[in-house]
Image (cartoon, rainbow, N blue to C red):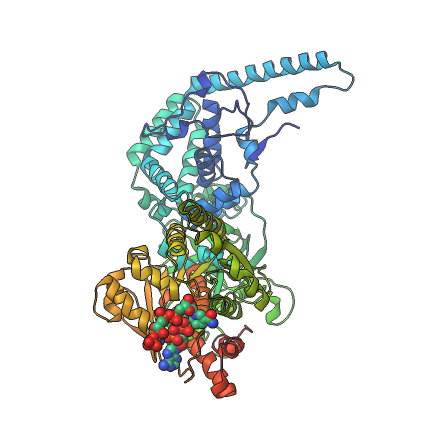
Amino acid sequence: MAKKANLNGFLISGRTKTSAKSRQAVPLADGSGAMNKEPPCSRKDDWQMPKLKLSALVISAFSPGLPLYFFIFVYRKFASADASALAARLVKSNGSGSGGSAFIGATADVNLDDLVAPAHTDQVEEKVEDGDSEAEGEEKKKKKAKEEDAKGEDWDRNFDQEGRVLEFLQAVLGPVADQLQNLIQEIQDRKGTDELPKDAGDAAAATSVDGQIKNAPPSQSFMNLKTIALFRSSLDDFWKCQSAAELKEKAARRAVARKPITELCQARPTGLKEAAPPAGKKAKQDADTNPLRRTFCLTMAIPVKVQYVARCFCRRVSFEVSNDPMTAKLCDCSACQRLHGAPMQWAALFQKTSVRFAEGLQFVRWYHTGTDSVCTSGVERVLPSKLQCTHCGTWLADEGRNNFMTFPTLFDFQGQGPSRFPVAFRPRCRIHCATRALAAQDHLPAYLDDGKTPVSLQDYLLDIAPPLDGRSYKGQSGRIGVLGGSVDFTGAPYYAAMAALRVGAELLYLCTAEEATGPIKAYSPELMVSEVYRWSSISSEDPGVVQKEIDRMVSKMEALLPRFHALAIGPGLGRDDRVLKAVARIIELAKARELPLVIDADGLWLIERLPELVAGYSRAVLTPNAAEFRRLCQAVGCEETLLQLCEKLAGPVVIQKGAVDQMARPGSEVLSCREEGAPRRPGGLGDFLAGSLAVLVGWAAARRRDPMIACQCACMLVRRACKIAFEKKKRSMVAPDVLDEVGLAFEELCPSKM
Ligand SMILES: NC(=O)C1=CN([C@@H]2O[C@H](COP(=O)(O)OP(=O)(O)OC[C@H]3O[C@@H](n4cnc5c(N)ncnc54)[C@H](OP(=O)(O)O)[C@@H]3O)[C@@H](O)[C@H]2O)[C@@H](O)CC1
Ligand SMILES: Nc1ncnc2c1ncn2[C@@H]1O[C@H](COP(=O)(O)OP(=O)(O)OP(=O)(O)O)[C@@H](O)[C@H]1O
């Protein structure tokens, strides 16, 4: 079979051989010609994108949605990466807004090879009938290939004569050429530093509303659906043109009428499908002039598989969604209480790309609380708006610029009771709790505002801890690295690692000296213990051997880093200069990956010598005890106060451990943990803190939450475990007794049952 990719109605088929002419560049409107570079590598050596085929491809990509265009574009930039990596990278660099999901949607079913190297030769091969001799077959192949080439050249020529493609590209790309370039630049800048979303936590963060808004790069405003809608309408215009002259005229008119892109975007709602036009002649006329018709014919051409259907009470209005909500919340704000006549609002959040109105759009009205304005025309509505059925009064949704927040109770789920709601629709937290109408009887994390200020540490923990809903796979809830242990110390890394596992890590990579692996493995089969260097080699008299072992250690850790959600460095590491030299390089590599780091014990010994290693790095947490704190302050040359040390380090959170644990970062106030703890001080409690912290800051990073509060939680957790252990063991309490209580302490703070 010939490989063809039917992208939403526009059939693309290409060839592997092209004329020199057709290998020329397709200029961007700004003349940069950025698309013209040869792909750095490709499946076939002679792969070339014919100029006009490329244009067609670009236009086709525009037709279903801009992100596909980027797919092609980015593919050509990073052709060595695989499609899913590109998708993930683009989603990330794109702030994962609607453009991101559209991109994923658009790329999910598209085979790269179909797009860039459809093989007419394959087609020819299939036509060779059984019984043909080899020579005859060859002859047929050549003939067919010649015909195909001729057809393709005609096709190219036709397009050339019309000049429509390039005209169109210039007309359409002109207004946004700068944004395109910026985005490409952004993607390039991030190359090598961005990673795939690592787990459910990451994915959740990528799709959380807070995450989106907070982390969206400026270019996201360009990548949103409204922009795509704008392109689509341009495209419709283009296809209607009968001649190049007409197209030119249209392009000129468009240029005159051109408004800033943001203004245009605001005027154009998207993601909604037009209502079926009413029957009858008059109705047809109405439909043609009806702004609703114009507004809502902006269907995204990404194939939508209807997953759930929601309806208003009278069933006049219905809409479909194509995937699970990104999150669901209970809102206790007084506006929701009043509008809904209920103690709270239960809302599920979707991206607009996954919502389609199926029926009754003519019954929808929009209410904008800010301006107290109502309208029944989608064109005039102000976003964000609340949607209501004009007939029965059911509140349907809150429509934002990118998101569509609707109510799980509008969906037709089968069954009875709470279990009829799919897990993804169940509320994950309560927001605006200060105005709660009813006392909470659930275990949902509560926020004072829209999700930034937890009511308590318990609420924060409940929020960042991955839900135990059975939907994740091994390792998604935490893959933690511990770099420590040495010939002298095998207990400390074991404690840090076990604490991490008890708190919630699922896979634990303990990276240590070969000589320490045996004992540590014997302590526990739960740990994945890897040797990353040999003490016998790194302590050699021969500088060549030492350097080689340092390099080996760095490269072994470099290979492991992508697996980690967080890395704790230091427990039992020892203070050998050669080992620390390697660790310094490992810290640099971890920073380049933006990996959350917890630096404790001998890791701090290294930082005391090279404070610049963590200076400015806000994803590091340093956990000095009294002695280490003193040394750190001396190292950076500041008075022994927490805030001064933080200012000097200009990035990391510092936890000053002691009778009261205190934590701060540059510019913050000092938070403290006064939980009682235990009067016994056996060695190893700091290691527990380091391991627990690694998990919590990893979770916090995944949910884009404040790591300072994660630090507060970790201190509280360890001290509470100490207290419980001491109550049981009194003076005989030793570190493993505390380890046994970490689970109970965590459960008190963050119940596993939702
Ligand atoms: N089971 C194992 O394998 C364990 C191994 N461990 C590992 O041992 C390695 C070395 O770590 P470390 O803490 O002993 O070294 P360091 O901080 O230089 O202490 C040296 C001197 O500083 C003082 N001092 C210490 N703490 C203080 C405080 N809070 N408040 C005030 N002063 C304090 C005290 O001196 P003193 O005042 O008693 O004269 C102390 O003698 C490291 O790799 C670690 O991970 C531990 O994790 C334990 C479990
Ligand atoms: N006086 C105290 N009262 C209660 N808890 C304390 C006290 N001092 C320290 N802790 C707690 O003990 C834990 C370890 O702190 P510590 O100062 O012993 O660290 P460390 O010296 O690095 O430990 P390690 O023995 O693992 O090296 C922290 O969680 C801290 O909150």
Query: 177 and 303: which one is in front?
Result: 177
Query: 527 and 162: which one is in front?
Result: 527
Q: Is residue 435 visible?
A: no
* Residue 29 at x, y percent in the picture: 34, 29
Left or right: where 291 falls relative to 11: left
* Residue 462 at x, y percent in the picture: 47, 71
Query: 419 and 511: which one is in front?
Result: 511
- Residue 741, compared with residue 28, is above or below; it is below
- Residue 289, compared with residue 512, is above or below; it is above
Q: Quadrant of the N terminus?
A: top right
Q: Quadrant of the C terminus?
A: bottom right
Q: Quadrant of ligand 2?
A: bottom left
**Residue at screen point 40% across, 35% down:** 234
Left or right: where 361 falls relative to 400: right
**Location of residue 403 by image quarter:** bottom left
Q: Is residue 417 visible?
A: yes
* Outermost right residue: 131
* Outermost front residue: 541
**Location of residue 664 by image quarter:** bottom left
* Residue 606 at x, y percent in the picture: 34, 60
